[in-house]
Every structure is written in C-alpha cells, then in structure tokens.
Image: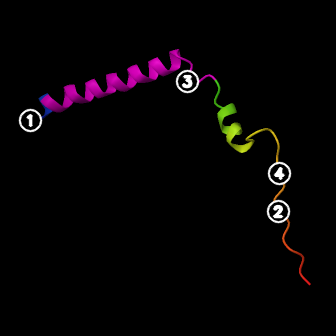
Amino acid sequence: MSVLFLLVPLAILLVAIFVGAYVWSTRTGQFDDLTTPAMRAVHDDGTVTPPPRPPEAR
C-alpha cells in the first residue's frame, strides 16, 4: 500500500511532463503541416525517374 504513495505522484509527474511537451510542440508549430514532409520523401527533387528497363530476352 505504501508503494502507491510513490507511484501515484510519479505517474502524475510523468503525465504533466508529456502534456507540457505536447502543448509546447503545438505552440511552436510542429503539427502545422503534416503532409509536406511525407511527400518530400517520395519526391526528392520534384522529378520522377522511371525504373530501369530489364535487359531484353532473346
């Protein structure tokens, strides 16, 4: 039972830290544009190169 006196405040402290990190990240604009970074990985420089052609079979 006495372990609850340690775990409950520790859990509340961890929740407060995570909520503070979330609030900080939303205020600094971390979640403003979620689409562009994902598309940037697909289109490196805006050009799409076709895959190499396999050698012709005889």
**Closer to the observer: label 1 or label 4?**
4
For the residues marked 1 and 3, what is the alpha-carbon distance in whole angstroms?
41 Å
Residue that badge 1 annotates: 1
Tag 3 secondary structure: loop
Which of the labelled discs sits on residue 49, or is there none?
Answer: 4
Say which amino acid is labelled 2. Answer: Pro
For the residues marked 1 and 2, what is the alpha-carbon distance in whole angstroms?
67 Å
Give coordinates of residue 51: x percent, y percent: 81, 59
The mark nearer the N terminus, 3 or 4, is: 3
**Residue 57 is drawn in which quadrant?**
bottom right
Residue that badge 2 annotates: 52
Say which amino acid is labelled 1. Answer: Met
The mark nearer the N terminus, 1 or 3, is: 1
Residue occupying image coordinates x 70% and y 37%: 40
Bin the neighbour count of mark 2 within 10 Å (Cα to Cα): few under 14, some 14-19, many 20 and up. Answer: few
**Residue 22 is drawn in which quadrant?**
top left
Image height check: is 30 above or below 40? Answer: above
Q: Quadrant of the N terminus?
A: top left
Relative placement, left or right, of 52 versus 3 is right
The mark nearer the N terminus, 1 or 4, is: 1
Tag 2 secondary structure: loop
Q: Which residues are magenta?
A: 6-32
**Closer to the observer: label 3 or label 4?**
4
For the residues marked 1 and 4, what is the alpha-carbon distance in whole angstroms?
65 Å
Say which amino acid is labelled 4. Answer: Thr
Residue that badge 3 annotates: 30
